[in-house]
Image (cartoon, rainbow, N blue to C red):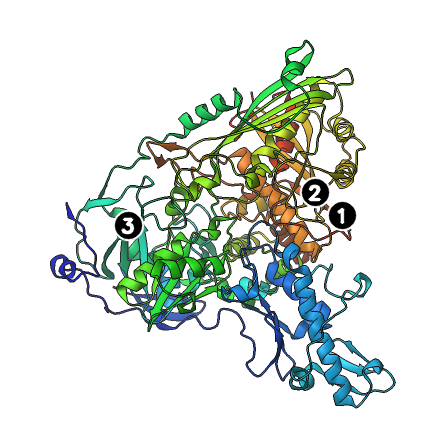
C-alpha cells in the first residue's frame, strides 16, 4: 500500500506493507542508509530517528504510523544542529561510527527537550543507545559541551 | 511440511508459486553503491601501492587494512603523508581491495602499525625523494639546494617553488631511489599527533558506507535461517505462501569437515527488501537433521574444564621441583577461575553483497581480511583468484567476528545460484546464535608463599576449547599462540614453577575475539596475584612490583617466542604499574564502600596497567572510575590510543559484568541485547588514560587494553566488599 513519508522535508511515496518498519523503508526503499539496523527489537538505538521532535526507534515504528508526519534522519542533522556535529568532531567521538547516527539523533532530541541536562539526565536519555566500541565518555563530553554552550 | 528445494531449481518455481526472479526491484536499490572510498587518479604519479599523486596535487593514500573503529585509515594516512611532507588538507584515503600485492591485510592481532610502520614510511619517503628530484629539475636548481615542505618543492636561495601537482608527471619519470632516509621524530607533523578520524564527516552525515549500506542494481536481499545446532541440515519445511516482495528460498548446506570459514547452511529467504526477507525467515517452520552437537551443553563443558584443571595436564613449562615444594607444609593460596563463552556482537551484524558478472565475482563487505576472503571465495567457486574482487567497506565494529567470512561466502553462493547481486543480512539473533565464540575457560592456580610473602612454588593450569578446533576436526590441544596469550608468558618467575594446559572439545565454532585468550589468562593470573598479596597482607601494587623483581629487562618466556625486538621488558611493566598507581592516587583513601583494584598485562607487544574504583551496594556493583596507563611503543595517533583504551574499558566491563553465552542441547540460549547485554552509558565509568611517550618499536593498541579490565574490577570488588569473585560474569556480590 502507498504511504506518504515526509523525510527531512522531502515527500516520498513508498509502496510497502503498512507494518513495514520505517527503518527498512528509509534504507531499502528510499535509500537513506545513514539510519542503521542493530537489533530489530528496539534494544540498541542504532536506528533512532525523529518523528516530529521525538526520538523513536525506526525498527519499531511502522510506516503507517509515521506517514504524513515530519521525519528527520541523520542525513539532515548537520543542517539542523551544526553545534552538535561540531562537538562530535571536537571530541573525535566515533570509533567504528555505526551507532553514531542513532547516538546523535538521541542526543539532539534530548537537547531540544532539555537544553542543559544534568549528568544523570544525559545518562538516562542515552541509555537506549548501545555503543560497542565504548565511545560513551566522549558522547557525554560532547553533549555537555553543547549544553554548556547553549547556556552561555 | 514438504521436502525443500531451491528457487534456482525450476521445479520449485513451478510448484511453489513463489514470485519469479526478476520481479520488480525498488527504485532505490538500483542506484548502485557509488564509490565506497576515493579511488586514486589514473593519471597520477604512483610510486607504490600505498600512494598516488594526481596532476592537481591531490594525494590518495591507500589503506590496505580494514577500518573497524581502531583508526587505521587515519593512522596509515598520517604515516604516509608525514614522510611525504604533504598538506593534510590535500590528502584523501582510498581503500585497497584484497590483494597479496599489499602484503598482509589480515586486520587482527593489533599489528597493522607494528607490521607496516616502516613500509608505509618508506612509501611516503620514496615519493618525497622522487618529488624532490623532479622539483629540482623543474626549477632548474641543484637537488642539494631544494627541499620539500607542505606539498611543495622549494628552492633554498630563491622564491622558486613547485606544487606536487605540477611535479607529479615529472616525478613519475624519476628513478626510484634505493635508499631512503626517514624523517627524525622531531620533524614529524602528523605522526604522533592527535588527528581526527579521516571518515568522521561521512560518518556524522550518515554517508559512510558500511557493508550493510552497499547496493547494486537489481540486487535482492537474503536473510538466512541458520541451523540451530552446528552441523544440522534442513530436512523439511512448510511452504511459504506467495506474497509481495518474496522471491523464493535457497537451501544452503554446510560442507563436511571442520567448520573453517564455510557457511553453516540453512534456508535463505530471498526477497526484494530486507524486511520481507527477515519476516519470512523468522516465521519459517523448518525441521533439522540430527547433529553430533545435539547434546552439547556449556554447563557440562564448564564442569569438564573444572575437572581438567583439578588434575595434571600437559606441562608446557616446568622448573624446579614443584610437586615436592607444594607437598611441604607452609602457607598456600589456591583457586579455580572460570569464564564463559562470549559473542563479539559488533553493532553491525555480519552482512555482505556479492555479484557475479561474466564469471567475475565481486564481493563488498565489512571484512577484516579481504585478501583471505578473496582466497576463500575463489576456493568456494573453484576459480582463480584473479576472477574474484573483494572490496572492504567500513566495518560497523568487528572485534574479530569479521575475520571469519562465512557470511560473505553465503552471499557469493546465492549470487552464483540466482545470477544477480545478493545482499546477505544477518539478524542480531543470527549474530548472537551463530558466532565463532570466544572460548569459555577454567584456570587453576596454587602457590606456596615464602617467608617474605612471595611465592616460592607456583602451579598454573588452563583448560579451554582451542581455536584450532575450528580448523581441524580432530584438534584438541590449545595452540602455542593461545598459550602465549597471558599463560606461558606471565612475567613472573619463581623457583618451582609449572604451567599445564588441557584442551576440551566444543560443540560450537570457536574464534578469536578482541584480545582472545588474554581475556581469561589475564583475569585468572591478576586475580590470583591479588589473592597472594592479600594472603601476604601486602598492598597489591607493592606486592606486584616485588614479585616482578628487578630482574633483567628482557624476560625469556617458554614456548612461542615474541617477534624480534618485542621481547617482554620487565622495566616497561614496572613503569606502567607505577604510572597508573600515581595517576589513580592508588594509596589515597576513598569513600566508604569504595574499593580500588589493580591489574597489569602485557599483550600484543604492549604494556597496560589499569586501576578501577568500584563500590558495592545491596549486592550491586557500581564502577566509578578507571585509570589506564598504556605503553605501546611508538604511537601514531595519541587520540586513537586513548580512544582504544576507553573502548577497552567498556568492552572489558561488559564481559566482566554481564557477558555470557550458554548452550543447551547444542543451541545457544541468548539471542539479542536483552539477554546478551553490553555496557550502556549509565554503567560507564569516568576513564582517564595515560599514554607513555616511547621510542620503542610500535606495538598493538586495539586489543591490549581489554585484558586488565575484568581482573581490576574483581580486585576492586574485593577491596570494596571483601567478596572474592572467581567466576565471570559477576552475577551477584553477597
Of badges 1 and 3, nearer the viewer stands 3
Label 3 resides on the chain identified as: B
- Residue B63 image point, x, y percent: 58, 65
Q: Quadrant of residue B41?
A: bottom right
- Residue A129 image point, x, y percent: 50, 48
Asked if both marks, 3 and 2, belong to the same chain, the answer given is yes
Q: Residue at x 49, y 46 (%)?
A: A128
Tell me which label, 1 or 2, sits earlier in the chain: 2
Query: Which quarter of the image is occupied by the C terminus of chain A?
Result: bottom right
User: In the rendered view, would you say B371 is above or below B620?
Assistant: below
Of badges 1 and 2, nearer the viewer stands 2
Residue B194 makes an appearance in the image: yes
Query: What kind of element bears circle 2?
Result: strand
Query: Which mark, residue B253?
Result: 3
Tell me which label, 3 or 2, sits earlier in the chain: 3
Q: Nearer the viewer, residue B571 or B343?
A: B571
- Residue B639 image point, x, y percent: 69, 55
- Residue pointed to by mark 1: B692
Left or right: B432 as drawn, with respect to B238: right
How crowded pointer 1 is (Cα within 10 Å; few <14, some 14-19, many 20+) is rated as some
Label 1 resides on the chain identified as: B
**Are the residues tagged 1 and 2 within 8 Å (C-beta)?**
yes
Label 2 resides on the chain identified as: B
Tell me which label, 1 or 3, sits earlier in the chain: 3
Asked if both marks, 1 and 3, belong to the same chain, the answer given is yes
Residue A19 makes an appearance in the image: no
- Residue pointed to by mark 2: B607
Query: What kind of element bears circle 3?
Result: loop
Q: Quadrant of residue A89?
A: bottom right
Q: Nearer the viewer, residue A75 or B730?
A: B730
User: In the rendered view, would you say B350 is above or below B232?
Assistant: below
Amino acid at each position: 500500500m502507498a504511504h506518504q513519508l515526509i523525510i527531512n522535508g522531502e515527500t516520498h511515496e513508498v509502496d510497502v506493507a503498512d507494518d513495514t518498519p520505517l527503518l527498512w523503508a528509509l534504507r531499502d526503499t528510499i535509500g537513506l542508509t545513514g539510519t542503521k539496523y542493530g537489533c530489530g527489537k528496539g534494544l540498541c538505538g542504532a536506528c533512532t530517528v525523529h518523528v516530529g521532535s521525538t526520538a523513536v526507534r525506526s525498527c519499531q515504528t511502522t510506516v503507517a504510523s509515521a506517514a504524513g508526519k515530519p521525519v528527520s534522519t541523520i542525513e539532515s542533522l548537520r543542517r539542523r544542529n551544526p553545534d552538535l556535529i561540531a562537538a562530535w568532531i571536537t571530541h573525535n567521538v566515533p570509533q567504528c561510527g555505526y551507532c553514531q547516527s542513532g547516538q546523535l539523533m538521541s542526543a539532539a532530541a534530548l537537547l531540544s527537550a532539555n537544553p542543559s541536562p544534568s549528568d544523570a539526565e544525559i545518562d538516562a536519555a542515552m541509555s537506549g543507545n548501545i555503543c560497542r566500541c565504548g565511545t560513551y565518555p566522549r558522547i557525554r563530553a560532547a553533549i555537555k559541551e553543547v549544553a554548556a554552550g547553549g547556556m552561555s | 511440511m514438504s521436502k525443500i528445494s531451491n528457487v534456482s531449481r525450476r521445479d520449485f518455481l513451478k510448484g511453489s508459486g513463489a514470485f519469479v526472479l526478476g520481479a520488480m526491484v525498488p527504485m532505490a536499490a538500483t542506484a548502485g553503491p557509488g564509490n565506497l572510498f576515493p579511488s586514486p587518479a589514473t593519471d597520477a604519479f604512483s610510486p607504490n601501492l600505498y600512494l598516488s599523486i594526481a596532476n592537481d596535487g591531490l594525494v590518495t593514500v591507500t589503506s590496505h587494512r580494514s577500518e573497524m573503529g581502531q583508526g587505521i585509515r587515519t593512522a596509515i594516512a598520517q604515516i604516509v603523508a608525514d614522510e611525504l611532507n604533504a598538506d593534510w588538507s590535500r590528502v584523501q584515503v582510498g581503500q585497497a581491495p584484497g590483494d597479496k600485492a599489499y602484503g598482509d591485510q589480515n586486520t587482527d592481532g593489533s599489528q597493522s602499525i607494528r607490521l607496516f610502520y616502516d613500509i608505509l614510511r618508506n612509501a611516503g619517503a620514496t615519493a618525497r625523494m622522487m618529488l624532490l628530484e623532479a622539483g629540482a629539475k623543474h626549477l632548474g636548481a641543484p637537488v642539494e639546494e631544494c627541499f620539500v615542505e607542505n606539498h611543495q618543492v622549494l628552492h633554498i636561495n630563491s622564491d622558486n617553488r613547485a606544487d606536487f601537482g605540477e611535479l607529479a608527471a615529472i616525478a613519475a619519470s624519476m628513478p626510484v631511489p634505493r635508499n631512503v632516509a626517514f624523517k627524525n621524530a622531531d620533524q614529524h607533523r602528523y605522526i604522533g599527533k592527535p588527528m581526527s578520524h579521516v571518515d568522521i564527516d561521512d560518518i556524522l552525515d550518515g554517508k559512510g558506507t558500511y557493508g550493510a549500506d552497499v547496493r547494486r542494481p537489481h540486487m535482492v536481499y537474503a536473510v538466512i535461517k541458520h541451523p540451530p545446532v552446528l552441523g544440522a541440515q534442513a530436512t523439511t519445511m512448510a511452504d511459504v505462501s506467495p506474497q509481495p516482495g518474496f522471491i523464493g528460498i535457497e537451501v544452503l548446506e554446510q560442507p563436511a569437515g571442520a567448520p573453517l570459514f564455510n557457511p553453516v547452511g540453512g534456508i535463505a529467504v530471498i526477497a526484494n527488501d530486507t524486511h520481507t526477507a527477515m519476516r519470512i525467515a523468522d516465521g519459517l517452520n523448518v525441521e533439522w537433521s540430527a547433529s553430533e552437537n545435539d547434546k552439547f551443553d556449556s554447563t557440562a563443558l564448564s564442569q569438564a574444564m573444572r575437572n581438567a584443571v583439578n588434575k595434571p595436564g600437559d606441562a608446557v613449562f616446568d622448573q624446579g621441583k614443584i610437586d615436592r615444594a607444594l607437598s611441604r607444609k607452609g602457607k598456600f593460596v589456591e583457586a579455580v577461575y572460570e569464564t564463559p563463552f562470549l559473542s563479539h556482537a559488533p553493532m553491525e551484524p555480519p552482512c555482505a553483497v556479492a555479484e557475479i558478472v561474466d564469471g567475475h565475482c565481486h564481493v563488498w563487505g565489512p571484512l577484516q581480511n579481504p585478501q583471505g576472503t578473496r582466497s576463500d571465495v575463489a576456493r568456494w567457486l573453484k576459480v582463480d583468484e584473479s576472477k574474484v574482487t573483494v572490496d572492504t567497506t567500513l566495518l560497523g565494529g568487528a572485534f574479530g567476528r569479521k575475520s571469519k567470512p562465512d557470511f560473505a561466502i553465503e552471499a557469493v553462493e546465492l549470487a552464483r545460484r540466482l545470477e544477480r547481486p545478493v545482499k546477505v543480512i544477518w539478524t542480531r539473533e543470527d549474530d548472537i546464535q551463530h558466532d565463532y565464540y570466544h572460548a569459555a575457560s577454567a584456570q587453576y592456580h596454587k602457590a606456596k608463599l615464602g617467608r617474605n610473602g612471595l611465592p616460592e612454588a607456583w602451579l598454573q593450569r588452563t583448560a579451554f576449547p582451542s581455536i584450532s578446533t575450528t580448523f581441524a576436526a580432530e584438534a584438541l590441544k590449545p595452540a602455542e599462540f593461545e598459550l602465549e596469550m597471558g599463560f606461558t608468558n606471565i612475567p613472573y618467575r619463581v623457583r618451582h614453577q609449572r604451567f599445564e594446559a588441557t584442551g576440551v572439545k566444543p560443540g560450537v565454532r570457536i574464534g578469536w575475539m578482541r584480545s582472545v585468550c588474554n581475556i581469561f589468562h589475564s583475569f585468572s593470573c591478576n586475580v590470583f596475584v591479588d589473592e597472594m598479596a592479600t594472603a601476604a597482607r601486602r598492598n597489591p601494587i607493592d606486592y606486584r612490583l616485588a614479585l616482578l623483581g628487578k630482574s633483567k629487562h628482557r624476560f625469556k618466556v617458554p614456548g612461542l617466542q615474541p617477534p624480534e625486538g618485542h621481547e617482554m621488558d620487565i622495566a616497561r611493566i614496572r613503569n606502567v604499574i607505577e604510572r597508573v598507581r600515581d595517576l589513580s592516587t592508588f594509596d589515597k583513601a576513598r569513600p566508604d564502600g569504595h574499593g580500588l583494584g589493580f591489574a597489569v598485562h602485557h599483550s600484543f607487544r604492549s604494556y597496560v596497567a589499569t586501576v578501577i574504583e568500584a563500590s558495592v551496594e545491596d549486592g550491586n556493583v557500581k564502577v566509578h572510575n578507571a585509570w589506564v596507563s598504556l605503553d605501546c611503543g611508538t604511537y601514531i595517533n595519541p587520540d586513537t590510543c586513548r580512544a582504544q583504551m576507553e573502548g577497552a574499558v567498556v568492552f572489558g566491563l561488559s564481559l566482566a559484568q554481564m557477558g555470557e553465552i550458554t548452550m543447551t542441547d547444542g543451541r545457544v540460549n541468548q539471542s539479542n541485547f536483552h539477554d546478551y547485554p553490553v555496557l550502556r552509558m549509565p554503567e560507564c565509568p569516568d576513564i582517564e588514560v595515560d599514554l607513555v611517550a616511547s621510542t620503542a618499536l610500535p606495538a598493538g593498541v586495539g586489543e591490549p587494553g581489554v585484558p586488565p579490565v575484568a581482573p581490576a574490577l574483581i580486585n576492586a570488588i574485593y577491596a570494596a566488599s571483601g567478596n572474592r569473585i572467581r567466576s565471570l560474569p559477576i552475577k551477584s556480590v553477597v
